[in-house]
Image: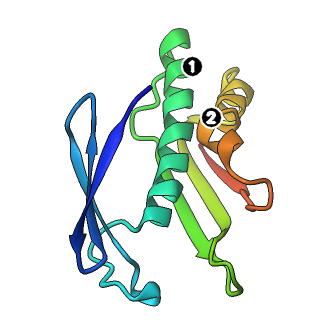
């Protein structure tokens, strides 16, 4: 089990410390929910976690197969629900790949991205469309 510790600093800000590495990140409530938006909100971290997880799983595949993914970029757009309870409604993912869609690895890279643990852990009501941009 990996533990993180979160300490509330007041003003809707937290510091989260990753147990094994002791790396720290800060969170702030978003502007549309009483915060200043000066750091990732908790739901922003979920969106970033999805993108990082997809990238990591593709990276694992790529390293095993000798595929260079350096420069791959992922953007995740997060949309919140307008009704109560407040929740993530949609995480729109765009992936810019440094390899061609005609590559023998393209389908396996797609599968790797879509089998990441964060993707599988998100509630099924959250829309998760993915748009791929392949190198020429």
Task: Give the left or right position of residue 69, taking residue 100 as reference.
Answer: left
Which of the two residues, 36 or 102, is positioned nearer the viewer here?
A: 36
Which of the two residues, 84 or 127, is positioned nearer the viewer here?
A: 84
Residue 90 image position (x, y, % from top left):
68, 67
Q: Residues within 10 Å of mark 1 (few under 14, many from 20)?
A: some
Task: Give the left or right position of residue 24, taking residue 105 as reference.
Answer: left
- The residue that mark 1 highlights is 61
Secondary element under disc 2, as helix, strand or loop, is loop
* For the residues bearing labels 2 and 1, Cβ distance under 8 angstroms: no
Q: How is the image coloured?
A: rainbow
- The residue that mark 2 highlights is 116
On screen, 19 above or below 31?
A: above
Q: Quadrant of residue 7?
A: bottom left
The mark closer to the camera, 2 or 1, is 2
On screen, 32 above or below 127?
A: below
Residue 1 image position (x, y, % from top left):
44, 25
Which residue is located at x 70 percent, y 20 percent? 104
């Amino acid at each position: 089990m990996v533990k993180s510790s979160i300490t509330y600093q007041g003003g809707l800000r937290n510091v989260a410390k990753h147990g094994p590495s002791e790396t720290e990140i800060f969170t702030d409530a978003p502007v549309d929910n009483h915060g200043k938006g000066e750091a990732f909100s908790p739901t922003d971290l979920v969106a970033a976690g999805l993108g990082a997880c997809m990238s990591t799983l593709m990276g694992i595949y790529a390293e095993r197969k000798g595929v260079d993914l350096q420069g791959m970029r992922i953007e995740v757009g997060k949309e919140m629900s307008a009704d109560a309870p407040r929740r993530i409604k949609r995480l729109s993912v765009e992936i810019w790949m440094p390899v061609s869609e005609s590559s023998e690895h393209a389908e396996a890279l797609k599968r790797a991205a879509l089998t990441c643990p964060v993707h599988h852990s998100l509630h099924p009501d959250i829309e998760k469309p993915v748009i791929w941009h392949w190198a020429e």
